[in-house]
Image: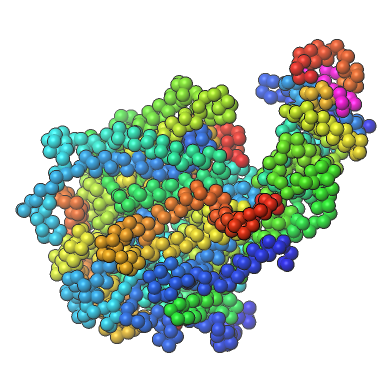
Amino acid sequence: MDAILLQILNGLDKGSAYALIALGLTLIFGTLGVVNFAHGALFMIGAFCSVTLQKILTISTISIDETQKDFLGRPLEVKTPIMENWFGPEIGGLIIDWSVPLAILFAIPVMLVIGYVMERGLIKHFYKRPHADQILVTFGLAIVLQEVIKYFYGANPIPTPAPDAFRGSFDFGALLGLDTALAYPYWRLVYFAFSAVIIGAVFAFLQFTTFGMVVRAGMADRETVGLLGIDIDRRFTIMFGIAAAVAGLAGVMYAPINSPNYHMGMDFLVLSFVVVVVGGMGSLPGAVLAGFMLGILESFASMNEIKAILPGIDQIIIYVVAIIILLTRPRGLMGRKGVMEE
Amino acid sequence: MAILEVKNVGKRFGGLQALNNVNLSVAENSCHAIIGPNGAGKSTLLNCLVGKLIPDTGSVMFDGQSVLGRKPYEINQMGISRVFQTPEIFGDLTVMENMMIPCFAKRDGAFELNAITSVTSQRDVVEKAEHMLEDMNLIDKRGMHAASMSRGDKRRLEIAMCLAQDPRLLLLDEPTAGMARADTNNTIDLLKRIKDERDITIAIIEHDMHVVFSLAERITVLAQGTPLVEDTPEKIKGHPKVREAYLGESQDAA
Amino acid sequence: MSFSKLTRRGLIKTSAVAGAGLALPTYLRADAHSGFTNAPTGDTVTFGFNVPQTGPYAEEGLDELRAQELAVQHLNGEGDGGMMNTFSSKALKGNGIMGKKVTFVTGDTQTKSDAARASAKAMIEKDGAIMINGGSSSGVAVAVQGLCQEAGVIFMAGLTHSNDTTGKDKKANGFRHFFNAYMSGAALAPVLAKEYGKDRRAYHLTADYTWGWTQQESMAAATEAMGWETVNNVLTPLASTDFSSYIAPVLNSGADVLVLNHYGGNMVNSLTNAVQFDLLNKEVNGKKFEIVVPLYSELMAAGAGKNVQGVIGSMNWNWQLQDEGSKAFTKSFGEKYGRPPSNSAHTCYVQTLLYADAVERAGSFNPCAVAEALEDFDFDGMGNGPTTYRGADHQCFKDVLVMKGTENPSNEYDTLEIVEVTPRAQVEYEPDHPMFAGGDLGECNPGA
Amino acid sequence: MFGTAKRDTALLIIVAILTLFAPFLLNPFPAGSAMAQFNAGYPDLMQRFVIFGIFAIGFNILFGLTGYLSFGHAAFLGVGSYAVVWMYKLLDYNIIWGLPLAIVISGVFALMIGFISLRRSGIYFSILTLAFAQMMFAISYSDLLGRFFGTTITNGETGLQVYRSDPQVLIDSWESVPHLLGLVEMRSTYTMRLGDWSFDFNAGYYFCAVIMLLTFYLAIRIFRSPFGMMLRAVKSNQQRMNYTGLNTRPYALAAFVISGMYAGLAGGLMAAMDPLAGAERMQWTASGEVVLMTILGGAGTLIGPVLGAGFIKYFENIFSKINDNVLHSWFAFLPDGIEDFMVVIVHPFVGKGWHLTLGLMFMLVVIFLPGGLVEGGQRIARLFRRKNARNDAPDGSKTPAE
């Protein structure tokens, strides 16, 4: 029982990452009809926003400490972050410690700009082109983006810890009055809550603003909306920026869960496509639902009890589920007819 | 003798009874028009005939055989060809290739793994396709991409592709919709000529009364999923029920 | 069928004569007269450095490449000579190898067997490389080792830790300086027993591929011999990035030690996840919960950051060692690149020097002569104390380091500290040890 | 000639000449020179060019003609390789046993996967094929099948290889080199030296090249056949297909199986040239690679996929080997400061940065040459033609399958 509860928590947590990435991806699919292979790279850039802010906040002054030696036996260079010089070690240290949450503020403008530039500079010219061309150009872009990150940050993962306040884990076991411990890391709970907020915000935005209504109408029938004299293109540009920001924010907060590296985007790319398609093309709720569903199923499949019966099932569960769903439901969980079926 | 016999066909979409107890009989080598206001169920009926939809009740017999439960390509192979409202052709292929595909379908059936011989070496098909193109006055455009033709040419090509299969029943779904008057007249002439030259039954759905009265020998009026009346064009013109249900309401369409 | 069975050899011979124009069974650029592949003809000799330059191990590959470049400099008499000054064999003079200047070509393994073989073949076929060195995974090492055996060049393996490299998949043309999973287990078990007690229950998470399997097998055997109990062994997919669903059940399993048989990105993520679950602050069975990472590397430790603190693991070598050889190498490397070398860099550096030295001693580049010179070669001054290249399986035997994540690092390179230098005798095993059984060195292949 | 139209015959002959003289054409620079780095005429890479050419030609029959974008074709490549290596293990190193088996087995896999996946179209089809291939990759990489059978089937991430303990029932003593009927070893190479130049003539390359020409010829026949026309019709308008009495499913399935068999043959040849079957060749990145090759070269064209395959393999194998030493040797003629500057400028794009160059090339090609590399060639050809005959009437005979 407790094992199942734990895996549900794990599944929700994994699922929130999948759902966030898939949400942005399906927005781009649905609104722009573009197969965006660079979406994983946007997630990766988000994570590197955390890294970058951490690096900025830890820009240091160097002083020589004669009493200590470095690895070559020379006097050790001691680095003191400027933040600590300015605000004193207490507050300065706290700011550095909170660099990941602070990176949200840093990442939003960065991702919106990246999204805007990408759409205006590149994607815009590919709306009318075949999907094959879109795949080639966005895949090329994804490679370029990750190589640029690799050039500046190296290939090794970079530890980006969560604030100390969120270290450790919360014991659900005590809360629920169970005998056994049911510990779950604080930061993962934060991540889940954060994704819920973002997902909610995107849905609210699309549901309750005129902008959102036009975009939804555009997703359903682009030409008609265009005929109404609404400048749908400009709104789609903004939509692309928002999709980029959602992927980026998913990455920012993911940084403490797994140290970011330059190829993490590719690791998520295939999976996020599977999630979007299982959810059904052009369906935002479908993408979110599929994200959580696959996250939870993946967690269940990695339980020892299940692996004892079906060894290796955790390696292929996502694909097995994808095949079963696509064969039983022709357009995924909640797909609309005619989107990306040609 | 009736080549197409529709009996008690009903089709429901959720809360909407699209077709209700439709009976229709199309005589061989006749031209039968189905008219009715928007939402009368004309297209639904047509889709039931070609296998795109399966009716909830009733039967559809073509030449004594049921078409129900058969796939569109099987029904086509039985001898029913369909012309669409907006021309459905192979836009990425040349006009000649468009013309050859139905010729192959007629000769080789629904599937043939003819992967080694060259298309051009199939003299019988090439000649037949060329003949059809000449007949339709499209031979000059044989090397063109079909998608880049005018709408009238596309319509003619589509009709030619259907005829190439020597169908026994040709279904036309508003063949002149959105056409200029001159193109419409050309199409009427073409269909008249086809009717004269071939042993073929034509069933046509049409809004344009000019087209209907120029071609049809019998007319069925459909309203709210039910046949209102069936008769000759002359009688239909004067029929009060029809005027009330259809002609009166949509003067602009007539 | 019988046709090919009976007359194959004859056919090859006749066809070779008859079709001499097209089908001479020579391999590449070697003059048939020299008797081996890529015999150096001019005044230079070319080494092939095959390391991952893209993909998850790119950083490790880069560090290997740095060390290899340094080794070439030292061989050619440039720089301060590094370990050449401390190496017990004095055959190398700093004038290249047998008077020939050493040059090198590089390739990208991508950490994929296919790509690594393609890249090694390019270096052998196109650039005339006489020896291939480098790599950072066992799958790649085994694949390239097999290729070098067929091509008739020497393979000096880089970082490869699976027992199979010098066990099931050993080859006469391949040599491994790096230690292996068995040695990790043998070195770690006594230290673990001393630090954490003999009454422990271990839970293994194991990367689901060959290296992971042999690592787990070795650790389980070694710790069980000390009295530990293995509660469970869970195989995790290589593609995993989030290990939470494997770590969550650990706490309630009754285990009080978690052994992470992971490497590279897998290890960084699984250790990070384990620390997130606060395992190190828990008490189970009345004992403090502990995590063990059998195979450490500096780069992984850097990637995992604070999470390695207090976690025990093993390494082949570390720059903090205070013997003359290690100090010379660290100084030489550090002055050139401004950072201490990693243990994979050390292995690649040493392998390059060992190869060059063997050529000098053998007086020939012929792989068979070189192999003979390397087999059962005893040396010292390369950082791991007195070392032997065992002839029976081409595995080096030397001291192994047990490491621990530094609790209060004083600088960015101070991530791991040496707990114990396990003496060589403790990690030695017989060539026919069951974990290494099933292989056959075969005969050395000079190619042409 | 050969039952093909004149233009196709000409194309076939040109391709045949190019492959025949590839050892010369790919080694234009003298062996010792600084530019020798760009030479691609060594056996392994030449073999790869033609093998991936076969893979891409086959993929194009599916994607280029029917428009069905499979994201899992690498699975068939892997199946083909495993089949050949298993034949090495069980029978002997003669490639003649394994290659037909590779084609048959990959055909069977393609039939099963295609039958299921073709129930869906568009991106749903793509994801189904991706899912099947990724499953097969995971199973191979961790040798999951082997766990059920108790013996290794794929030998995990190391790759399937031949051991001395393998049965090899057709021979008494152990062999180590793939050969054809005992007549010629695949790795036999004759090196011809002409002055500073050196050219490799490799038996394996020519074997693959002959097979590539056969498959290319077959592809031409398929493109020009009624079947090929039907496949293009499937891509163009499935609705019209259905209402013209044609069943689209078996057409698409036949194309899927044929292209799967091409992939299996390519995989088999990879193992025939290099007796090891690695699991990575089934990964989605490998499937993605053939998609990129086809689009890059020009989907739906005959020669495009071959060009795309060559382009990507060239970058992977040549650019990844350029290190700073090589750069310094190129720019050695410049003054020191400028030399270092040039090295710094070029450094990010070569060696470990070869991915960056590849990514940029993808973007440049697709932005400036919407029809892929073939379009580039056509533009150049048009440029020449315009120069030669300005008053020529526009070429109306352009067939879309070019």
- In percent of width and height, residue C157 lies at 34, 69
Looking at the image, the residue that sits furthest to the front is: D391
Residue at the left extreme, as displayed: A67
Q: Position of residue C353 (x, y in %)?
A: 26, 74
- At x 75%, y 17%, the residue is B252
- Residue B141 coordinates in the image, percent (x, y): 75, 45
How is this picture coloured?
A: rainbow
Extreme right residue here?
Answer: B1
Q: Is residue A303 magenta?
A: no
| On-image quarter of the C terminus of chain C | bottom left
- Residue at coordinates 45% horizontally, 77% vertically from top-left? D197
Q: Give the vertical position of C440 relative to B208 (above or below).
A: below
Q: Position of residue C263 (x, y in %)?
A: 33, 56
Quarter of the figure that contains the N terminus of chain C: bottom right
Question: Is residue B220 one of those drawn in magenta?
Answer: yes
Above or below: residue A64 compared with residue A102: below
In the image, what residue occupies the spot 43% across and 88% down?
C33
Residue B67 seen: yes
Q: Quadrant of residue A302?
A: top left
Q: Quadrant of residue A81?
A: top left
Q: Residue at x 56, y 39 (%)?
A: A128
Q: Give the magenta-colored segment's residue range.
A: B213-229
Q: Is residue A154 left or right of residue D247?
A: left
| Residue B70 makes an appearance in the image | no
Front residue of C401/B124: it is: B124
